[in-house]
Image: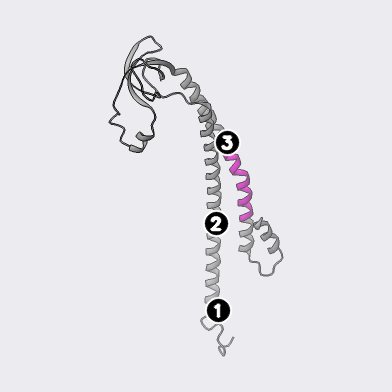
Amino acid sequence: MRAIRGLWRWRHNPLRRTTDLVECWLALAALLLILVVAPVSGVLAGTAAQDALDRSMREQRDSRWEVTATVVRELDRSVLDIDPEAAASDTRTRVLADWTAPDGGEHRGPALTPLESPEPGDRFTLWTDETGRTVARPLDPATATTHAVLAGFGAALVAVALLEGGRRLALRRLVKGRHARWDREWERAGPDWGRTGTGS
């Protein structure tokens, strides 16, 4: 709105310089581009991210199976748990478990269980691939949508930043040109400008 008011105010003002008018038009163009380009880029990026995540979700659902595992015994914390904050906030327990893979093979190995105090014989579910190796659970729709929305917002913010950065660079060039013209005018006026009795 400031740019529009500025354009209106400068229309017939005798003190208006060309650079002032260019600056106002530049601000108006940047505002209009931000209002159009940012939402469009956000929607396009969010839609593309949602499509990619939906494909990934389908692939994961087709290649991962939820199986029931039986606790053999509780294991000590892994040596890889080097971050004390992450280790303290993780509510899962590391156990040695038996499970049957989707291909019928019997497996035994370390697994993470949500059970608070697992006892031998307790059952829990875990995700495996078709050969029985443990894998992360598939991506759920809510998480995929959240990631897509964040991608859309990120793309919109990048578009705004690029447009505003371009406007500021153009404005900087305008101001540099304005200052260069002022310097030339001061040089032409000479060092005696404003002194009495110097022929002015």
Which amino acid is tagged 3? Leu
Residue 110 occupies quadrant = top left
Q: Which residue is mark 1?
A: 189
Q: Earlier in the sequence, mark 1 or mark 3?
A: 3
Distance Cα–Cα, label 1 vs label 3 = 56 Å
Residue 4 highlighted magenta (yes or no): no
Q: Is residue 3 above or below residue 83?
A: below
- Residue at left 30%, top 31%? 80
Badge 3 marks a residue whose secondary structure is helix
Instruction: Give the amino acid at mark 2.
Output: Ala
Question: Mark 2, residues whose alpha carbon is within 10 Å: few (<14), some, or many (≥20)?
Answer: some
Mark 1 against mark 3, which lies toward the viewer? 3
Q: Is residue 37 magenta?
A: yes
SS at mark 2? helix
Horizontal and vertical percent for residue 150?
A: 52, 37
Give the spatial CA distance, label 3 vs label 2.
Answer: 27 Å
* Label 2 sits on residue: 170
Please tell me whether residue 7 is drawn above or below residue 199 in the rendered image. above
The span shown in magenta is: 26-44
Q: Position of residue 193 (x, y in %)?
A: 55, 82
**Of the two numbered discs 1 and 2 in the rendering, the one whose residue sits closer to the viewer:** 2
Is the stretch drawn in magenta largely helix, strand or loop?
A: helix
| Amino acid type, mark 1 | Ala
Residue 25 in the image: state x and y as whole percent.
64, 56
Residue on which the image places disc 3: 44
Q: Nearer the viewer, residue 158 or 199?
A: 158
